[in-house]
Amino acid sequence: MNAFNSKLALALGILCISIFPILVKLQLTSSLISAFYRMFIAAVLLLPYVLFTKKFQLPKTKILFLAIVCGIVFAIDIAIWNIAIQKSSATQATLLANLSPVWVGMGSFFLLKNKPSANFWIGTTVALLGMITLVGFEIFTQLNFDLAFILAVLSGILYAAYLLISKTILSQVDVLSFMSIVLLSSSLFLGLVCGITAENFTGFSNTAWLVLFVQGAICQLTAWLLISYAMQNMRATRVTLSLLGQAVLATIFAWLFLDEKITFQMILGGLILLLGIRITFYNKVIMDFKSLK
């Protein structure tokens, strides 16, 4: 039953995250302010609850430090991700940032006790092929190996680092306490960045404030509470690769709400991507690499 709940939580979390690109495309605020309020609003909603209900438990110094680092890493990832999108096409930035399953797999192999299975590597290869098909093979002819390229790749590495660190922490801390520390540290860091870059924190339209609230309440708080719960009970590699599914859902939402076209190539890519994710959840070993020696 716990395994079913974890998978359900992961699926719902991915659904909540998938709304975010649609909201960002509205461009009602700057990217950095959007990132700040995404974390800040989530923190404002969560912290009073955990404090008044006494559900917050201060972890040991080492774990507390790691949780703060985790929050800052996530904040830097969001900031770098936004800059990469601003300086290049969203497609290039998305493709490069979604290399995170590869980095998580490598990190898990060297740092975690549960090593990635053969099915993970097969599923990752298939899923990345699906991602490439989804965004279009022609994007590779347009890759610019410039600062934006480096930032997008770095974003994927930071995202992987966040997931790996959180997996370690969540084995010793409950989800609500972990998320409280992450949201607070992320908000403070991004608030400082926005202050240094002279961003405007007010003066937005009512629609913009509504979008910012949805980003914080749904795309951050709800989504990452669910994903963190899944991370606590599932392999980090499975969770990371499953997060690629948001690309499929984001494409569907863009079709529904932004009138963006869905081509046969995009449908094919989405199916291949989902197949790759499914392979990682297949318990029987598809191919034993040791038998090939």
Image: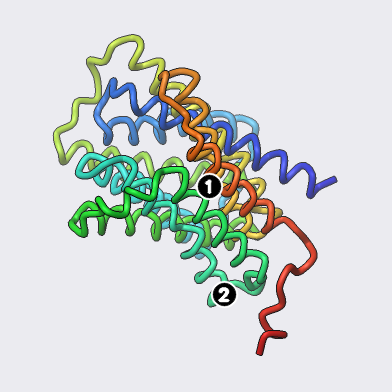
Marks 1/2: CA distance? Answer: 20 Å
Q: Residue at x 47, y 56 (%)?
A: 162
Residue 61 visible in the current orientation: no
Q: Residue at x 57, y 48 (%)?
A: 273
Residue 15, position as x, y percentages in the image: 58, 33
Say which of 35 and 106 sits in front: 106
Task: Look at the picture and state if 254 lies above or below 69.
Answer: above
Quadrant including the N terminus: top right
| Nearer mark to the viewer, of 1 and 2 | 1
Disc number placed over residue 259 in the picture, else none = none
Q: Earlier in the sequence, mark 1 or mark 2?
A: 2
Residue 221, position as x, y percentages in the image: 53, 34
Q: Residue at x 45, y 25 (%)?
A: 254
Residue that sits furthest to the bottom in the current view:
293
Q: Kindly indicate the quadrant of the structure image that contains residue 170.
A: bottom right
Q: Secondary structure at mark 1?
A: loop
Determine which residue is flagged by label 1: 244
Residue 119 visible in the current orientation: yes
Disc number placed over residue 109 in the picture, else none = 2
